């Protein structure tokens, strides 16, 4: 069967073993030679693993001249783990307090909402009233055309339409009058030629 490779965390742990076991200071090129041979970490992943340990404060680094050096001592790792543990414990305590507060809030919100016969009756009555409200709303919408505001709006709209129609009627009479004077056409001939009703008149 195919041999399973190391996980990212396993590689990190083995990299730390190199520092703890040797208590030495290394350059990247040194670790790229040591890690594959002694800890089974591929040389291509050494840089990434090392950087993640530096980012987490588990490995120290410094530039001396043109080279970067890396080191880590068990005492610092112990302090780092202790700080991490304290941080996690603080987060756990805070989460526990929030959970407790939410639990109390939930219990408080349940007060008065117990499944009693009285509550069931009130909920049923509420449902009936809501249904009645919807029916009344539908009834109001049906008779909306009788609403004084709606009637007034329709009256104003009709007035505008009436005035517009009378303006066009006035224009037609003016054109007919001009045509009779200019060309001597009879009124009946003009009406017939332009499809103008004989009874065309202003709207009162």
Image: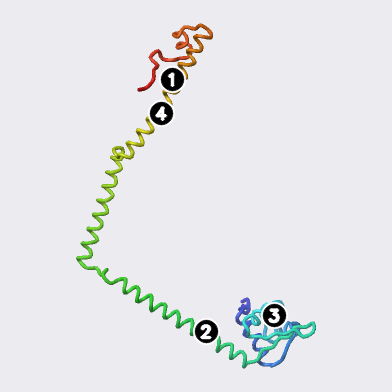
Mark sitting earlier along the chain (3/2): 3
Q: Nearer the viewer, mark 2 or mark 4?
A: 4
Mark sitting earlier along the chain (1/2): 2
Neighbours of disc 2 within 10 Å: few (<14), some (14-19), many (20+)? few
Q: Quadrant of residue 101?
A: bottom left
Circle 3: element type: helix
| Disc 2/disc 4 C-alpha distance (Å) | 78 Å
State the residue in front, 122 or 143. 143
Residue 52, horizontal then vertical, whole percent: 64, 79
State the residue position of label 2. 87
Left or right: 184 in relation to 73: left
State the residue position of label 3. 46
Left or right: 175 in relation to 22: left
Q: Nearer the viewer, mark 1 or mark 2?
A: 1
Circle 2: element type: helix
Q: Nearer the viewer, mark 3 or mark 2?
A: 2
| Disc 1/disc 4 C-alpha distance (Å) | 12 Å
Q: Quadrant of residue 81?
A: bottom right
């Amino acid at each position: 069967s195919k041999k399973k490779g190391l996980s990212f965390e396993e590689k990190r742990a083995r990299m730390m073993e190199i520092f703890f076991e040797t208590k030495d200071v290394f350059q990247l090129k040194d670790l790229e030679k040591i890690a594959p041979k002694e800890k089974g970490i591929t040389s291509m992943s050494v840089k990434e693993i090392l950087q993640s340990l530096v980012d987490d404060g588990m490995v120290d680094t410094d530039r001396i001249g043109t080279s970067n050096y890396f080191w880590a001592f068990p005492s610092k790792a112990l302090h780092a783990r202790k700080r991490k543990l304290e941080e996690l414990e603080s987060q756990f305590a805070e989460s526990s307090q929030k959970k407790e507060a939410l639990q109390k809030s939930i219990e408080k919100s349940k007060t008065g909402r117990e499944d009693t016969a009285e509550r069931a009756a009130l909920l049923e009555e509420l449902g009936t009233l809501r249904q009645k409200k919807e029916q009344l709303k539908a009834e109001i919408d049906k008779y909306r055309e009788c609403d004084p505001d709606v009637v007034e709006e329709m009256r104003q709209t009709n007035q505008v339409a009436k005035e517009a129609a009378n303006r066009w009627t006035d224009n037609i009479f003016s054109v007919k009058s001009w045509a009779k004077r200019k060309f001597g056409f009879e009124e009946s001939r003009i009406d017939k030629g332009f499809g103008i009703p004989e009874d065309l008149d202003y709207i009162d």
